[in-house]
Amino acid sequence: MKKRHITVFLLAALCAAGAAQAQNAAPATQEMQFPSREGSLSPPSTLRMTVTPETPPVVIRDTPASQAEFQRCRQVSDRAAVSNAQMQAGVEQCLRELEQRRQQQ
């Protein structure tokens, strides 16, 4: 009776270890066949989706002074712009300056 408990325990441990390794090995791939209804005249097609685990996003914290400078830059460039292209160029410049301030921190 004792051997059976040990054998069952070892088998369960091996299964759990194998399942954990399979989860870490490769992202899961899911296949779906479309259309899924019978009698459809469309030819079937296969959709393959690969699910990868999400990594947490990097949090960027700007100082209140940097945020205020960005807002000021946007207001000045928006007021000065007379076309959409000029407005976009002003936004790009403000974002470049913001990125430079982030690099200096």
Image (cartoon, rainbow, N blue to C red):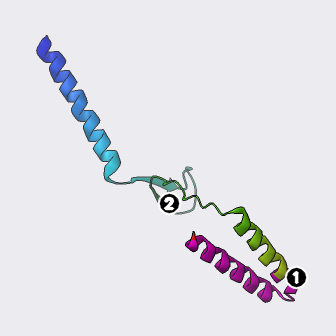
Mark linked to residue 96: none
Label 1–label 2 contact, CB within 8 A: no
Residue 91: x percent and y percent? 74, 79
**Disc 1 or 2, which lies upstream in sequence?**
2
Residue lying furthest top in this view? 1
* Left or right of 60 in this view: 87: right
What secondary structure do most residues of the magenta stretch adopt?
helix
Q: Secondary structure under badge 1?
A: helix
Residue type pointed to by label 1? Arg
Going 79% across and 88% down the picture, which residue do you hit?
Answer: 86
Q: Secondary structure under badge 2?
A: loop
Going 57% across and 73% down the picture, which residue do you hit?
Answer: 104
* Left or right of 23 in this view: 12: left
Going 71% across and 79% down the picture, which residue do you hit?
Answer: 94
Q: Residues within 10 Å of mark 1 (few under 14, many from 20)?
A: few
Q: Is residue 24 magenta?
A: no
Residue 57: x percent and y percent? 54, 57
Residue labelled with disc 2:
44
Residue 46: x percent and y percent? 47, 60
The quadrant where residue 66 appears: bottom right
Going 45% across and 52% down the picture, which residue do you hit?
Answer: 53
Q: Is residue 87 magenta?
A: yes
Vertical relation: 99 (above or below) 85: above
Image quadrant in which the N terminus is located = top left
Magenta-highlighted residues: 77-104
The quadrant where residue 70 appears: bottom right
Residue lying furthest left in this view? 3
Q: Which one is nearer the viewer's eye here, 84 or 30?
A: 84
Vertical relation: 45 (above or below) 6: below
Q: Which one is nearer the viewer's eye here, 42 or 105?
A: 105
Residue labelled with disc 1:
79
